Amino acid sequence: MVRSMNGKRYVLAAFITAMIFILGLLLGLVIEGKRVQFVGQQSQTQKLDLSSLQLQYAYLIQLGEEKNCNALTQAFDASVENLETTRIRLENYDQGSTLNKEEFQNLKREYTQAQLQYWLFAKRIRGMCGVELSTIVYFFGTEEQCPNCEQQAFVLTYLKKRFGRSLLNFALDGNYDNVEPVIATLKSIYGIEKYPALIIENKTFYEFTSMDEILNEICKYYSEPIADCLKTNQT
Amino acid sequence: MTDIFDISLSVLYIITLYYTIFWLLAFVDMKPERKGKLKTYPKVTIVIPCYNDSRSVKKSAISVLNLNYPKKKLELIIVNDGSTDDSKQVLKNLKKEYCSRNISIINQSNYGKWQVLNRGLDRATGEYFVCLDADSVVESNALINLLPEFKEKRIAAVLPILKINSPKNFLQRLQWYEYLINIFYKKIIGMLNCIHVAPGPFSIYKTKILRKVGGFKKGHYTEDLEIALRLQAANYKIKQSFDGEVYTESPATLKELWIQRTRWNRGSILNAWDYKKMLFNIKYGDFGMFQLPIVLFYGFIAISIVALTSYLMIFKPLFKTIFNMSFVNFDFLTFIRTYKTNINLLDLSYYNITILFVVLIITSIVIVLSHRYLRERITKYNPLSLLAFVFIYYIFLGLVWMNIIKDLVFIKRNTKW
């Protein structure tokens, strides 16, 4: 005796399962589109922020109003923090993207340029306002190229939390040199071939740099000892 | 979707989704059955195995004696399987109290439940044979509602609605939901003639068929699974009814539940393996091609889903955080002090959300339908227990399965199965 089977039900179940997955993929594409839109809007805001900061800077220089530097550095720090938050988002979105790779790449380029503009701007502000500030430019690579990059980023995030406005981190994708020539230029100037690599002010650190090594370096740039540096010196 | 774990989880998800959709389609195809009425009252033998059940056996027996069924057509056999408590005396008193009824008490040394049922089967004079566990009670109309389900010649067994008897604690309430969903599930797979277990409390068999297939076997201490698989192998049908309720006691502690589920699940995998000749065998229709594979591999799927979900959502991020924290001297305080909420819906993983959404939708449908068809209110118990059932209970079952597979693969590797 052979039992009966409803073949149509097997096919229909497979079809519905496939449809649910297609629906999931479509939902993914809609969300991806929204992400591109969101990061694009953020990029516009960043550009406006930077123009505003440059305007403030020009104004202060012209009027010799260094006493108002505090407002400028505060706004600057907030902008850099926003920039970094959106950059991390952009990296994550880009990793999971399917159809919008090109849009994300363009946005990434915009953010890379913005990072470097902010980095240069930070040096100018420090010069004019005399603020206690150190900068770190961090070059990262893919997980295969750079198994320690995640830990390096974690250490930098931690230090930013400790130092607040006194430390500015700028993260750049080292593999982006073929898209954004300025990355290639920087890599050539600082001799960067492997990741992670850090440029702390003008000194380059290759491969993973521990928290203590970073502290030893950045603390040199503070004229008045701050708590974290004192702690490091004691240990 | 980056590594082997994500891909494995997706594959398991697709398999589970496919099975669920298949079952729901079978449910959609389910035609309303016209409920027949008994024209004659066939004789029915009910066997109650009793092993140290002195506190509950009387209640079970009385529920049988109170069945809305002609008294002359009911034969009650209670087999005292070497109880060491006062069951013998309780049964003696019961027989005395109901001396006008057809009650046989058999006292024997302890042989195990399957032997008890066979002893009852040997003595049975009824056209139908019913087993009732001594910790269960049957509602008065159960028999009269269940017998009309034997409409076809090849129906060998009809199963009642099995519910937890007055769940008292949180754990029992979780099982309450589980039992309801299980009955609903069995109704669907019953339509496909794919039922692989005929539970102890009040499953009704045709005595003739039961004898023909050789009665009960030990079946790795799950004779109810073994007999169902044997009936399937002999191409008989097992039907789940939405009528006729039986109430059973359930484990009240995690330890008791762990032991019970270990026995059940171990039994299901070992018995399924014993009947592997039906596996992916088109001769056995949906049962061989669709149901038996899931019975056999359900444990592996359950373990894999629990293990992978726990790894991806709990352990991987946890280990990563601990590892990363080691580079900053485990200064958690700084992270806590400077924590800022930065929630953006676009950051959520739409892949995981889609899975979660689909799982929740299907779970909700199943919960609503099972309550509706079994005439129960969803709000009968604290909603927390329902939430715990949906989100937490499967972890427990996954752990039970892990333990079973560990035993089978590593410790008892010489077991022939």
Image: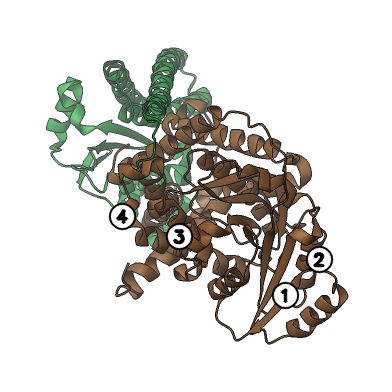
Same-chain status of marks 4 and 1: yes
- Cα–Cα span, label 3 and label 4: 15 Å
Mark 4, residues whose alpha carbon is within 10 Å: few (<14), some, or many (≥20)? few
Q: Is residue B123 above or below residue A220?
A: below
**Residue shown at the point (36%, 45%) measured from the top left:** B284
Q: Is mark 3 on a helix, strand or loop?
A: helix
Point out residue B212 in the picture as x, y percentages from the top left corner: 47, 61
The residue carrying mark 2 is B62
Q: What element carries label 1?
A: strand
Q: Which of marks 3 and 4 is in front?
A: 4
Q: Which chain carries label 2?
A: B
- Letter of the chain in brown: B
Same-chain status of marks 3 and 1: yes
What amino acid does circle 2 point to? Ile
Q: Specify which label sits upstream in the sequence, 4 or 2.
A: 2
Q: Is mark 4 on a helix, strand or loop?
A: helix
Q: Mark 4 lies on which chain?
A: B
Q: Are marks 2 and 1 in contact (CB under 8 Å)?
A: no
Q: Is residue A128 above or below residue B227?
A: above
Q: Which of marks 3 and 1 is in front?
A: 1
Q: Specify which label sits upstream in the sequence, 2 or 3.
A: 2
Q: Specify which label sits upstream in the sequence, 2 or 1.
A: 2
The residue carrying mark 3 is B268
Point out residue A172 in the picture as x, y percentages from the top left corner: 27, 31
